[in-house]
Amino acid sequence: MATAVDPAWLPPQVWRPLGRRRVAVRGSGPLVETVRAEVTDACGRFGGEVVREEPYDLLLELRADAAPDELGDEGFACARDDGPTTVTASGQHGLLHGLFHVVRLGERAFSGRWERRVHRPAVALRVLDHWDNVAVHPVMGQVERGYAGGSLFWREGSARGDTGRLRAYARLLAACGINAITVNNVNVHTVEARLLTDRVAEVAEIADAVRPYGVRVHLAVSFASPVVLAGLDTADPLDEGVRRWWAEAAERVYAAIPDFGGFVVKADSEGRPGPFGYGRSHADGAGALAAALAPYGGTVRWRAFVYDHRQDWRDRSTDRARAAYDHFAPLDGRFAGDTVLQVKHGPVDFQVREPVSPVLGALPRTRLAVEFQATQEYTGQQRHVCWLGPMWSEVLRFRLGDESVGDLADAFAAVSNVGDDPHWTGHPLAQANLYTFGRLAWQPDADPAAVLEEWIALTFPAAPERLADGLRAVLAGSWRTYEKYTAPLGVGFMVQPGHHYGPSVDGYEYSPWGTYHFADRDGVGVDRSVATGTGYAGQYPKPWSRLYESPRTCPDELLLFFHHVPYGHVLHSGKTVIQHIYDTRFEGVEEVEEARRVWAGLADLVDPAWHARVSERYEEQLRSAREWRDQLNSYFLRKSGVPDARGRRIH
Ligand code: GCW
């Protein structure tokens, strides 16, 4: 039996439970019209009926007086007693989210009874940042770190204007709970800078296409815009002319896009211009932009990804992991009201394993966004299956002080993994990352395993249990599998320089990027303790600062992030570091072999095009995993001279 899977997301079958019912939609407004159109379409397909009056099985109702304080603009209440299922919202966005909630519930939405329950997102901003270039970049291409084809928005310098696809994309995002997109790369090159000014009409077209699904558009802007775009002789954020220029730019943007979301800024980072160039602080820099957006309620997301990317590898006193905290913790309380400091979830750069960034606990008076990377730059580039739900959930549940990261955050952002690929994400199974980001951004303490179940059910409606079991088997543990065959014990960055795919143990060891592992004949890892290392461990509140400080208490999976230890160091697991390195690499490859076998066994249950695409990627994943295993094991055998206790073949 072949399950029809629509690569265009939310395959029609998913609407069947709702589409068989009598459904009433009450209220008015553009998003209510979207809801009505979805319901009408579903009922048209499956024999249900859109009705005005009772009796009905489902009522989707917008009522301005329906507990607006409790529900907010995006929340909704859902209840079912003896009568129909009811979804009530006081804002249009809430009704749309309520619709997708019913879709997720499927038949369960129409059986049993339950008390009124309120659902509302933990934060108001849940945004995907597209690192899409308008003009093809000579090195980075159309999409920087993009593994899903071209951009949905741009092609070779022009707007694609594919409003149908954009609308479908917005629908997909709404189904995940995502409510904003940034349509250009945070590395803002000359052409892209103009989206803010004379090319804003192209952004407005995108905004028009995604608005019916409650998605708002943001722009990445260059801090040097006043110089680059208007020929001012300075971009000094305290200069009156500069501030006026930003205010006027914002006014023009809002004239074109009344619900424009705001700016994201990468400043003084990897060669981008920023306030340091004018002797100003990042609070001053963000302040100028925040002031320009304030009259319209727009948000500045200011990235904390600031470090010295021209470090001398000989210099052991500089530690890239420390940089964001050192730069930003002293600025707490100095950011203007609507500024959100956007912090990568780990201190370095989206490695498969990093500790949680201590910046997230260091600015209690600053609004914070946590930035994840859905695009799999360092996690297999959408050629490998690597479902990141468990990693993101660990971050969100991690407690810094009294609160979890999920509680501390005011917004969630992820670098998008979507492109114009027919499957949206290149690797079809990478759709699970997109969905999981959206659901965790809505509810940071959600159980990722339950989110995975939702994704399976929405993507393969009415899948036989064998298919669901198979999908679970290949996805649930895939992050840990990836970690096993790549970088050991939190060490990170043993990748090929530049494109970051595949192993190169010393690829970054003598580079200016600040990402070293210091392996020698005796041991490996970075001493970041306060006592003898860079002091990074001291950036954490207790108990973490204490725990990370000593190799005796540091968790195994982060040991080499915090400490340089001898190969014979015994882990909490009872194994030596060198044996752990060997064992995990062999295990990782075996797990990929097993996943490939499981996938092959699902051929009769999955759409042939889907199945073939995933199978083909498994071949590459396995080839690559073996390469990781062999390079890493050979490297460490040669460095350490310690043989594998199990005598396996190492080259
Ligand atoms: O991970 C690094 C990437 C860069 C990226 C940068 C950032 C957009 O390799 O491609 O630039 O992070 O987050 O700004």
Image (spheres, rainbow, N blue to C red):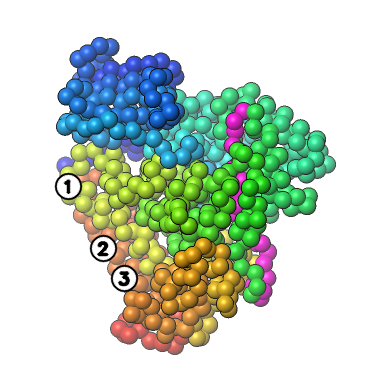
Q: Image quarter for residue 167? A: top left
Q: Spot the residue most to the top.
A: 53
**Where does the image place residue 571, in percent across and percent down from the top left?**
38, 78
Answer above or below: position of 357 versus 573. Answer: above
Going from N to C along the chain, the mark reached first, 1 or 2, is 1
Main secondary structure of the magenta stretch: loop
**Where does the image place residue 609, in percent across and percent down from the top left?**
30, 44
Callout 1 amino acid: Glu
User: How many residues crowd around disc 3 within 10 Å: few (fewer than 14), some, or many (20 or more)?
Assistant: some
Callout 3 amino acid: Glu
Going from N to C along the chain, the mark reached first, 3 or 2, is 3
- Whether disc 2's CB lies below 8 Å from ligand 1 is answered no
Answer above or below: position of 227 versus 26. Answer: below
Q: Is residue 290 visible to us here?
A: yes
Residue under label 1 = 465
Callout 2 amino acid: Glu
* Marker disc for residue 594: 2
Q: Magenta residues, as a range? A: 296-315
Q: Residue at x 51, y 78 (%)?
A: 564
Q: Residue at x 36, y 55 (%)?
A: 390
